[in-house]
Amino acid sequence: MANTMFTMKLDTELRDEFMAEAAAADRPAAQIMREFMREFIQKQKDEREYKEFLRRKVEKARASMEAGLGKSSEEVEAIFAEKRAALRRSMGITE
């Protein structure tokens, strides 16, 4: 992989503290910056993928509801209330 120079402006105190911590970790500052950049790139990609996943999920759910295949909140609540009641009965819990 070819190397290229990257220059940026930093607050003097931030730079000095970063360089001191890099030295304390016995690692070159450039190596740490490359690591930070890779982590940032991966985080951004992961966030975009997750947002796209959610968008598709919502789109699919909306299509399902429009096709009459979904259940209302009240129907879901009733189904799970019965499931909870059945579980309590199977465990011998009476309330």
Image (cartoon, rainbow, N blue to C red):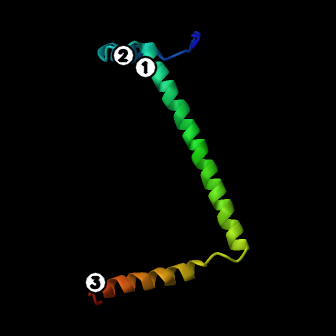
Q: In whole angstroms, how far apart are the C-alphas of marks 3 and 2? A: 58 Å
Report the amino acid beneath label 3.
Answer: Met
Whether residue 22 is visible here, answered yes or no, is yes
Query: What residue do we see at 31% from left, 85% from top?
Result: 90
Q: Which mark is residue 65?
A: none
Secondary structure of the residue carrying tag 2 is: helix
Q: Which mark is residue 32?
A: 1
Tag in front: 1 or 3: 3
Which residue is denoted by mark 2 in the rendering? 22
Query: What residue do we see at 31% from left, 18% from top?
Result: 25
Q: Residues within 10 Å of mark 2 (few under 14, many from 20)?
A: some
For residue 85, what is the image quadrant? bottom left
Count of numbered tags: 3
Q: Residues within 10 Å of mark 1 (few under 14, many from 20)?
A: some
Report the amino acid beneath label 2.
Answer: Ala
N-terminal-most mark, 1 or 2? 2
Q: Is residue 72 left or right of residue 93?
A: right
For residue 67, what is the image quadrant? bottom right
Q: Residues within 10 Å of mark 3 (few under 14, many from 20)?
A: few
Whether residue 15 is visible here, answered yes or no, is no
In the displayed structure, would residue 29 be above or below residue 36? above
Q: In whole angstroms, how far apart are the C-alphas of marks 1 and 2? A: 7 Å
Which residue is denoted by mark 3 in the rendering? 91
- Contact, CB < 8 Å: mark 1 with mark 2? yes
Q: Position of residue 10 (x, y in %)?
A: 51, 16
